[in-house]
Image (tube, rainbow, N blue to C red):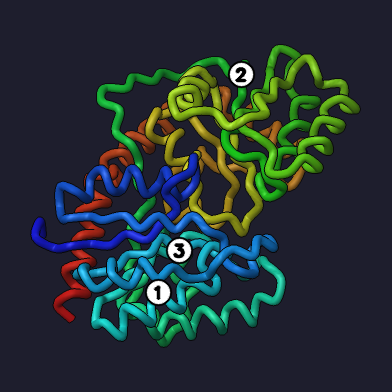
Amino acid sequence: MTNRDVLLVTPWERKGGLATYSDYLVSELRNECNVSIFAWDYESLLARGSGQAVFDFALVKSIRKSDVIHVQYTFGRYLLSFFFIALLGKLMRTPVTMTQHERFDNLPVPRLLYLWHQFLYFFVDEIIVHTENRKTIVGAYHRPNVTVIPHGVLEHGDVEREPRDINDILIPGLVRPIKGHPNLIGALNHLPENVTLTIAGSASSPEYGTELKELIESAGLSERVTWEDEFLPEDEMFQRICEADLAVLPYEEHTSMSGMLAHCISWKTPTLVTDCPSFRCVINTEEAFLDGRSSELIADSIERVNNESVQGEIIMEFEELISECNWRRVSQMTSNIYETVINK
């Protein structure tokens, strides 16, 4: 498909999140087709009160020159903008593909948002989601146009990982209320005193950062918790993941697929994740799941995985996932979608 011209509309000129995701995808996609980037780093008019523009007329020229449009869609980023982008695609007979990265049934006015998105899907030729569970965000009428393509995983060559005694625990990534930090911090009180926790990532807001720091201090855990409260460059984050004896991602059950989980998989770092539908669709070993409803339950799961055979099961599962979900395969599956919508 090397002769197809693809316009990728995505956050691009920033660090982390969808910009990093798109960078990994584009690096491989350019072996399959001609990719042009339209950096859509604005927030929508009603997102976070930003008041930024919902449309850019430079898009018109880019859409006219393209065989297919692919929008990396996340709630808020394109709440209003996507309608104009997709409508232009229809008017110019340029097929539109979107990757739906997040759900919205846990947000305010979920029914209204659900209905709005079902309307938007009428302007979309193919919807990509990362897991079978995520198909439920799309109504039955549009579901025939949904394809599951897994979240990509980096290949780092011959990474060797052996089970370890668990002394250093890591929770990587942006620190947000949905990620379960309080219960993980509290779990240290139910684990041996030699077990420490590293939080690698900045707080989503100063208020939440202050709240967590006060929790750490009041629990008497200041000596056992290291918080790198800043954005870590990719190489530094990879170093933290490799150095950790165990990664723990005790996210809330409505979470989407996690980019940090993909990084932990890529380095074969044993990882415990919340037992939720999104992660169940990715990981196929019981050993990797935890119950994050309390600090005691998280501590029990950490003690359970402090075992050579249990860690070995998780490492083997991650090796299979690297083979199945590497970015090369993901880009091939994505380019096949482009060909399908162009030929509809």
Q: Between 88 and 329, which is closer to the camera in this rendering?
A: 88
- Observer able to see residue 284: no
Quarter of the image that includes the C terminus: bottom left
Q: Amino acid at mark 3?
A: Tyr
Residue at 33 percent of width and 43 percent of height: 24
Residue 276 placement (x, y as % from top left): 57, 54
Q: Is residue 171 left or right of residue 84?
A: right
Question: Quadrant location of residue 156?
Answer: top left
Q: Is residue 122 left or right of residue 339?
A: right
Q: Residue furthest top?
A: 194
Q: Which-is-in-front pick, marks 3 and 2? A: 3
Q: What residue is shown with label 2?
A: 168
Query: Tag 1 or tag 3, which sits nearer the N-term?
Result: 3
Residue 271 placement (x, y as % from top left): 52, 34
Q: Which-is-in-front pick, marks 1 and 2? A: 1
Between the C-alphas of marks 3 and 2, the distance is 36 Å
Q: Secondary structure at mark 3?
A: strand
Question: Quadrant location of residue 304?
Answer: top right
Q: Secondary structure at mark 2?
A: strand
Q: Which-is-in-front pick, marks 3 and 1? A: 1
Q: What residue is shown with label 3?
A: 73
The answer to whether the residues at label 3 and label 1 have Cβ atoms under 8 Å apart is: no
**What is the crowding at mark 2: few (fewer than 14 residues within 10 Å), some, or many (at least 20)?**
some
Q: Between 285 and 28, which is closer to the camera in this rendering?
A: 28
Q: Amino acid at mark 2?
A: Asp
Q: What residue is shown with label 1?
A: 85
Residue 275 placement (x, y as % from top left): 58, 50
Q: Is residue 331 above or below residue 238?
A: below
Q: Amino acid at mark 1?
A: Ile
